[in-house]
Amino acid sequence: MSKSVFIKTYGCQMNVYDSERMADVLAPLGYRGAADPESADLVILNTCHIREKASEKVFSELGRLRLLKEQAAAEGREMLLAVAGCVAQAEGEEIARRAPQVDLVFGPQSYHRLPRLLAERRSGGVRVDTDFPVESKFDFLPEEAAARGAAAFLAVQEGCDKFCTFCVVPYTRGAEQSRPAADVVAEAARLAARGTVEITLVGQNVNAYHGDGPDGRTWGLGRLLRRLGEIEGIRRLRYTTSHPRDMDDELILAHRDEPKLMPFLHLPVQSGSDRILAAMNRRHGVRLYLEWVERLRTARPDLALSSDFIVGFPGETAEDFAQTLRLVTDVGFAQAYSFKYSPRPGTPAAELAAAVPEEVKAERLAMLQELLGEQQRAFNRGMVGRRLPVLLDRRGKRAGQLVGRSPYMQSVAVAAPDQLSGQLVEVDILDAFQNSLAGRLADPAASGLCAGAAA
Ligand code: SAH
Ligand code: SF4
Ligand code: F3S
């Protein structure tokens, strides 16, 4: 019997990947994608626990869904509600207690057991599965049920052993684990065969990748990227998110030698103060970060950098914050994410006394974002007048418009016919904004073919 599932995804790229894999697990049970939650037989919230705001969203969304579920019941339909992802992992029992309308709760490592969970749920009550199973879910996930689109995520590594003092990820995702290289290559080849052109390798700590290689050796991420570069049809490679401590020479050389590897790197630094970095247990100082940046830029001079920053970590002084601004000025980022520190239950930093007042956090965040915004606008302005290869992969806001990514991760909007969707085209950049670029197809007659190597 055909049933429908609606999956709402919060949080990071790993959750985006997991949501697609959940759909793969459900496909053999007859579940197809639903256009909206109203009509779905199963609604899954794939949640994020990284900051307080992210987890709060889940409970308010569950309130709305309770009404939908009641409405469905009044119409004689059953709607199942499930909470997955990192909030499920961290607060499974709490969800079961506070939201009895929820039928299933399962963590990021156990969604391969969904068929069993769905069957067992009939025994009544909220089913909670937040174990870290001994088996790896990757060994049990079926092959992809549908094409992933022109640009796709592929998980190669999961979990984190770093235990930064502010972060929930080691608790919600568990210990670091790498998939065998051959499995990754096989998945990438299947994606390519179904039209994927760009693959972003994802992992909480992706450059800690150390998978079993087919040659009996352990492969790092640089080696894996070179192998993936051999797959015909794959024209662009990216990876996220990296930790400065896990950079290595092979990965840096991949930026020099692998033409399919895009010149963009998200390398979170969090703070420009060594004192704060130590309190965060980041295991790197400012000097190491700057050294990697220099070596990366030597390997790939046009490399665009992005980062994450936390302002107002407990004990952060005006001088610590000034050092963060200095680091931003010294490095020059093409884009970045910045957040006010949010104390997370169960993390060591949540126990620290010297909290920074909310208004100071807000002030520092505004200053940092102004500087980062300036850098981003300048970086984008530098693209005007250039011709860039753009992978068009979604519709734009206006009719007749397609949007895609430049090699440097910028969104580029261009007037283009629908049949160019999924194609790598050359675009002349005409205009730049803070978060995007606009341009014109370089040669409407020839575009879409975009002959030549990866770009
Ligand atoms: N694996 C990635 C981070 C994942 S979380 C890494 O190691 O960089 C994404 C970002 O959220 C982090 O880089 C950090 O900047 C931010 N973040 C994590 N915990 C936070 C907290 N408690 N408060 C504010 N920001 C946080
Ligand atoms: Fe969190 Fe730190 Fe691990 Fe990143 S490296 S996921 S910030 S604990
Ligand atoms: Fe959020 Fe979990 Fe990703 S906490 S950022 S969804 S690893």
Image: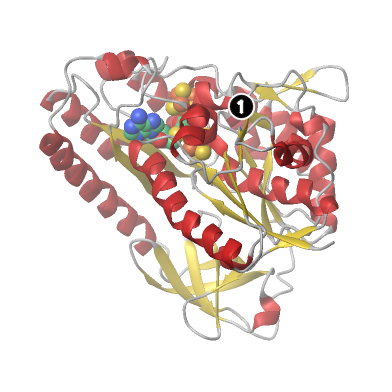
Q: Quadrant of the N terminus?
A: bottom right
Q: Is residue 47 above or below residue 94?
A: below
Kindly state the secondary structure of the residue where label 1 is placed.
loop
Residue 108, image x, y percentages: 62, 33
Horizontal side of residue 256 vs 88, given as left or right: right
Q: Is residue 362 visible?
A: yes
The residue wearing badge 1 is 130
Residue 308 or residue 330, whichever sits in front: 308
Residue 212 screen position, x and y as percent = 80, 21
- Which picture quadrant has residue 3? bottom right
Q: Where is residue 91 shown, x and y percent of the image?
A: 48, 29
The residue nearer to you, when weighing 354 against 395, is: 354
51 relative to 77 in the view: left or right = left
Taking the spot 85% from the left edge, 41% from the top edge, the residue there is 186
Crowd tier of the residue under label 1, counting other residues whose Cα lies within 10 Å: few below 14, some 14–19, many 20 or above: many
Taking 45 as reference, is 446 left or right? right
Task: Name the residue at the right extreme.
Answer: 215
Give the quadrant of residue 430: bottom left
- Given residues 279 and 28, the one toward you in this image is 28
**Where 316 sits versus 204, above or below?**
above
Q: Is residue 299 visible?
A: no
* Residue 130 image point, x, y percent: 61, 27
